[in-house]
Structure formats: C-alpha cells, structure tokens
Image (cartoon, grey):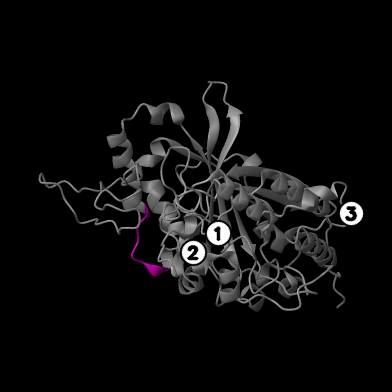
C-alpha cells in the first residue's frame, strides 16, 4: 500500500504518556495536584498572569503552540479543552467505494497533519491563515451509515450504533446523524474556521455536507486553573471527567473489539437548546437545587469545593435529601465504572429566536469506549427524572466511532479501510 506523503512528518509516533506531557496535562494537574482536567490544563493562576505584558506573552505563546497530530490515538480527545471548536458532519455520496473512502481519509490526514504544524494544506488559497495553529487539533469519526454504505457492518465496534429515542428529544435533522464527522478545535476562532474550511473542501469530493455546529469556551489563559468552565446558564460544566492515563484507559479508549478500533473511542454529540427566559425567572437557590451544585464555585450542595464528591445520603433536619431526587447531579452520578465517560462541551450562540430569546445552548460532546454500556444508561436516567429538562431540550444527536491515531506515512482509519 502506498500512502499519501506528508511534508515534514515526525519521525516517530507519540505515546499516550508522552502526548499528555507535551499537552501540558501532567505538569498542570498531576504534578501541581490540580483535579480540573476539563477546565483546561494550559492556564496561569492570577499571580502568574497579573500583568498585561505577561498575558500578552501567554497569548502569543498560545497562538504558536502546536499539538502533535500523529500518535497512538487521535488528538482533540485527551487534549486540554480549546477555546473554540467546530463539528461538521457529512453523508457519503452515492456509490462511494472503500477505495474512495480510503483516498478521502488519506487526503484528510495529510491536510490535518500540515495544519497541526502551522503549515497550509495542498492547495490552500489562504496559506497565511494556517500560520497560527493555536493548539489546533483535527479529529475524525465514522457514523453507522459509513459502515453500512461501504459494506463494513461486521467491523462495527461492540456497543456502537444509533441511540434509542429518549422522551425528552425533539431532534431536528439539520443537527442529527452523519456518516463522517470532523471536529476541529483551537484557541483561535480564525484558525478553527480556516482549518474547518480546508478539511470540508477535501471531504466534499467524497461526501455531502449535512450539518455544522460551532461553539466556544472561555480562553484558557489568565483564569483559575482549578475550576472547570461554565455553560450559558452560568453553571460549571464538565466536573466529573477522567484525569489520569489510567482513567482514560478505563473509560475512553477501546481495549477490546475489532483490532482497527483499539485505542479508538466513540463520540456522542448532542445539541441542547436552552430556555433562558424560563431559567432567568428562577432565583439562585432554585437553580442550585435543580443542578445539585452551588453556582459560585460548582461545589456539590453537600461540599465546599467543586471536586468534592456529592454526599447523596445527606439529609436536612426535616429529613429531606440535601441533593434532591430530581437534581442533575444525582441523576448523572454513578458508582458503576461502566457508566463513566469524558465530557468536552462547547457553548453555542446563533443569534435570536423569533421570540427575542437567544438561540443558544450547549454542544454536548461525550467520548467513551462503548455507547450502549456507558452513555445510554446515564442519558436514560436523565431523561426519566432530571429537573434540568424543564429548561433544556435536545434538538440534535449523532454518534460516531473514532479510529485510533496514525503514524507518519499512515492515515486515520487505516486499520478499517486497509
């Protein structure tokens, strides 16, 4: 097999531990004792970012920072959360063959490897937009239709497939499904837009655009490094996440199933529309009761710090539970190791609805080895009894199987497509 050449390829792959170190995770939350992976590891505390000069220096470093593309697994999953991101889904064009799908992934891999280094794709009409990678990552996955259309149903991972219908869903086709997904993340919105455009142009030779969703988080500099980012309801969002290589091995990376999927993972993307008019009518006490956490620092109602474990047995003097039966924390909480996974949410804001309210919410992205065992039971509990459903509505949903990473000279999905 002759693979697409990649300019200035790294000479060797990146190990799991090596990639963590290069991304700043080990030094930022293991050595420093910080437990807030999802909040972003590449941060400075208030003292370190106390002057405009230091903040400007950090911003410049962020814009030139790179994340290795090649490695044991795909970048953009364990990578500390970037400030901006886009998910784009496509459907394969009629008659696309395995050979053509292979060519598509070879070309996309070449594009993504160049962009990750701050180099333009071939061709690139705006090459100067590629020069600030800003921790750019490009991640690829295959939906159920990818396997069925290419006659690869027998290669689908165990527990992967379309989600069941949930009672709270009001799904819209313009935000749902897809045969191929491309996720682009970076700390510069211009970098994200440029990379998404280049990758989408390559994909369009073989697949039709289906939907695109773009979101944001807080910038990762000049903020407390021990607190997770917030969603548009003002809540800390993504507290309970794997933070060590051992936890990622147990919750995220596939260790069994088809050989091509080993060190890959599954992605669930849910678009959650928020009812700001209704939410804004609540006082802080009611908001905290619905969530089960304090608004000011994200601590559970039974604790004082964000990463304190919720005490679900705690009761008030009147015998009522401190964390209500309908609270989001209680419904999502589990002691079952098979029901834990990685959350990487993005906020979205798309103007105003006809009512004058924001057309905004959450692009909820979750990564796990087995969708049916890990994600579905948790989502079912939330659908059955979670008071937050009063102000949130899922309007989009899609699932994808993400292959492991690739090595120089190879391409994403090589184990599946040959």
- Relative horizontal placement of residue 288, taking residue 168 as reference (left or right): left
For mark 3, what is the residue? 123
- Relative horizontal placement of residue 245, taking residue 192 as reference (left or right): left
Q: Which residue is rendered at x = 62% and y = 59% of the image?
A: 400
Q: Is residue 92 visible?
A: no
- Helix, strand or loop under label 3: loop
Q: CA distance from mark 2 to mark 3?
A: 37 Å
Percent x, y of residue 128? 82, 49
Percent x, y of residue 328? 35, 47
Nearer the camera: disc 1 or disc 2: 2
For mark 2, what is the residue? 28
Q: Which residue is rendered at x = 51% and y = 53% of the image?
A: 164
Q: Which stretch is magenta?
A: 332-337
Check if mark 1's residue and mark 2's residue have beta carbons within 8 Å.
yes
Q: Earlier in the sequence, mark 2 or mark 3?
A: 2
Q: Quadrant of residue 266?
A: bottom right
- Helix, strand or loop under label 2: helix
Which quadrant holds the C terminus? bottom right
Q: Is residue 336 magenta?
A: yes
Q: CA distance from mark 1 to mark 2?
A: 10 Å
Q: Looking at the rendered structure, which numbered label has been put on residue 80?
A: 1
Relative to 413, does residue 161 appear above or below in the rendering?
above
């Amino acid at each position: 097999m002759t693979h697409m050449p990649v300019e200035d390829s790294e000479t060797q792959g990146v190990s799991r531990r090596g990639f963590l170190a290069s991304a700043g995770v080990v030094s930022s939350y293991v050595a420093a004792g910080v437990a807030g992976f999802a909040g972003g590891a590449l941060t400075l505390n208030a003292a370190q970012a106390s002057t405009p000069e230091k903040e400007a220096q950090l911003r410049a470093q962020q814009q030139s920072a790179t994340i290795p593309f090649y490695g044991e697994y795909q970048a953009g999953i364990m990578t500390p959360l970037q400030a901006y991101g886009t998910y784009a889904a496509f459907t394969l064009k009629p008659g696309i063959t395995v050979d053509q799908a292979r060519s598509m992934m070879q070309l996309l891999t070449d594009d993504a490897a160049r962009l990750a280094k701050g180099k333009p794709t071939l061709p690139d009409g705006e090459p100067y937009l590629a020069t600030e990678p800003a921790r750019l990552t490009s991640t690829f996955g295959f939906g159920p239709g990818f396997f069925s259309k290419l006659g690869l149903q027998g290669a689908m991972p165990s527990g992967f497939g379309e989600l069941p219908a949930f009672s709270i869903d009001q799904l819209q086709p313009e935000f749902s499904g897809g045969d191929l997904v491309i996720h682009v993340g970076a700390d510069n919105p211009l970098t994200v837009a440029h990379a998404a455009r280049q990758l989408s142009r390559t994909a369009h030779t073989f697949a039709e655009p289906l939907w695109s969703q773009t979101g944001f988080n807080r910038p990762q500099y000049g903020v407390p490094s021990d607190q997770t980012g917030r969603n548009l309801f003002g809540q800390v969002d993504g507290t309970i996440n794997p933070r060590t290589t051992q936890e990622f091995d147990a919750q995220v990376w596939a260790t069994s199933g088809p050989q091509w999927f080993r060190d890959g993972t599954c992605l669930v993307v849910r678009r959650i529309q928020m009812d700001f008019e209704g939410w804004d009518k609540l006082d802080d006490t009611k908001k905290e009761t619905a969530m089960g956490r304090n608004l000011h620092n994200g601590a559970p109602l039974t604790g004082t710090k964000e990463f304190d474990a919720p005490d679900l047995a705690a009761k008030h003097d009147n015998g009522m539970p401190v964390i209500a039966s309908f609270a989001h924390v209680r419904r999502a909480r589990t002691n079952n190791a098979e029901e834990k996974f990685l959350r990487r949410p993005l906020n979205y804001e798309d103007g105003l609805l006809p009512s004058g309210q924001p057309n905004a919410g959450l692009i909820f992205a979750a990564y796990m080895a087995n969708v049916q065992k890990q994600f579905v039971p948790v989502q079912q509990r939330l659908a059955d009894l979670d008071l937050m459903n009063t102000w949130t509505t899922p309007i989009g949903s899609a699932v994808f199987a993400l292959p492991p990473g690739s090595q120089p000279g190879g391409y994403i999905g090589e184990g599946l497509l040959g």
